[in-house]
Amino acid sequence: MVTNRLLGIPIFMAVMGLVYFISVSTIGTWATDWTNDVFVVAIQGWVGGWLESIGAGALARSLVVDGVIGGLGAVLGFVPQMTVLFLFLSLLEDCGYMVRIAFVMDRLFRHFGLSGKSFIPLLISSGCGIPGIMASRTIEQDNDRRLTIMTATFIPCSAKLPVIALMGGVMTSYATGSYVAGGLIAPAMYFLGIAAVLVSAIILKKTRPFSGKPAPFVMELPQYHLPSARTVLLHVWERLRGFLIKAGTILFLACVVMWFLGGFGFSGNGFGMVEDTSASLLAMIGSVIAPVFAPLGFGSWQPVAASLSGFTAKEAIVTTMGVLARAAGDVEDPVTVAEAVAGWFPTALAGFSFLLFNLLDSPCLAAIAAMAQQMQSRKWFWFAILLQNLFAYAVCLCVYQIGSLALGGPFTLGSAAGILVALALLFLLFRPDPYKHSSYSKRSVQAA
């Protein structure tokens, strides 16, 4: 049934939708809400009181409580959701189901110029984009391998899950229920990532550098078996360990940097600590770049600054939002970080556009380094970075501008730009393939 020509893909969509729904909206959310709203707040209160009792200054207390604990707590609070998600994915992998999905997706991918070999890196990228990019080495054909490397990070990885979960909470501020908002946003992002891979594959396959038929895909389907508890728990720990190591290194540094940029600036007395984050260095930087993102719906400096921090590590988006919301004093009981962040976006569509942009733009620095290593070409590497960011910008421009127009907004210059970009993408998507009858492309060893 799960490999049936008609039922295979609907069953896969139902399974993944259920997995993300449970992970992000029920069991995972209950644990995450308690961690964010009770555990982290209690630690902040205890550490803040202890620092004050030993005579620590206001600057040191702000750095530790608002910067480090607030920033890391905003990210680590989503570990329960990630644990539940990794547990379900490991169960599906160990029982033999995910291997069969690669067989099913081969049939689908072949219609778009890719083979099932490209699905394996995409599947691995749901945990982390770096091993997903590295897994592209099994693809013999140069054009398919490059195309897979460029698009593998469209799939939401573990680092993007906290962003999805947080923005799902932001959607709740506009929707009537958390199940509608958070429950559907998570699986929607997963399937939108797959759709972005297929759309970009169609467009690029109609160009000479990526033309050629996909190679045949042959694989052995193992027998179904009960998952091993040891194997499943080991897979979950391996994925969580990488996230926790990053939290203790890159994200710790990001917390300190964002606290400094968000807490210091120029005022009437010169350079120093500012009470209003809108006068901070980060606000100055974000305000300069904000007009570039205004057509996408998030023209405030806070989400722009969060997006910039995401280029170092996607989890840093949540870290930056947590630091800025707490430093500004917007997070007070019973207001959560998500409710505070919702005030940065004029509409739910603007928040969705922000989430979609950070799903599709270039990945974190570690994944970018892996891309450079696997591309083995400076030209193709920079083409990949440019493609990812331009594609993300174009898609979000169309979504926000056309969506705003459809919801009753006025027709503006941005609306015209969104419609023109949408027409251009549709033309590239549906134009006749001039290389439709091309033979298989060269293998990597032959090209070298």
Image: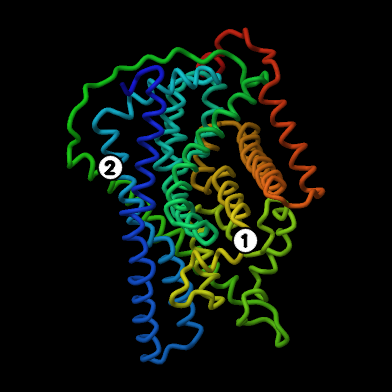
- Figure check: 232 above or below 50: above
Give percent across and percent down for residue 108. 48, 21
Secondary structure beneath label 1: loop
**Which mark, by number, is residue 147?**
none
For disc 2, the marked residue is 235
Q: Residue at x 35, y 35 (%)?
A: 15
Residue sitting nearer the eye, 315 or 337? 337
Q: Residue furthest right?
A: 413
Task: Tell me if residue 328 comes above or below residue 94 in the rendering.
Answer: below
Residue 229, relative to residue 286: is it above or below? above
Q: How is the rendered protein coloured?
A: rainbow
- Relative horizontal placement of residue 26, taking residue 337 as reference (left or right): left
Mark 2: amino acid: His
Q: Quadrant of residue 303?
A: bottom right
Nearest to the eye among marks 1 and 2: give it: 1
Say which residue label 1 marks: 345
Q: Is residue 249 left or right of residue 96?
A: right
Name the foreground residue: 244 vs 88.
88
**How many neighbours does mark 2 have within 10 angstroms: few (below 14), some (14-19), or many (20 or more)?**
some
Residue 56's quadrant in the figure?
Answer: bottom left
State the quadrant of the C terminus: top right
- Mark 1 crowdedness (10 Å alpha carbons): few <14, some 14-19, many ≥20: many
Q: Tell me the kind of residue under disc 1.
A: Phe
Looking at the image, residue 230 sits to the left or right of residue 426; the answer is left
Camera-side residue: 255 or 350? Answer: 350
SS at mark 2? helix
Whether 324 is drawn above or below 355: the answer is below
Query: In the drawing, does residue 336 fall left or right of residue 12?
Result: right
For the image, the number of numbered tags is 2
Query: Do the CB atoms of the residues marked 1 and 2 lie less than 8 Å apart?
Result: no
Q: Position of residue 79 (x, y in %)?
A: 35, 56
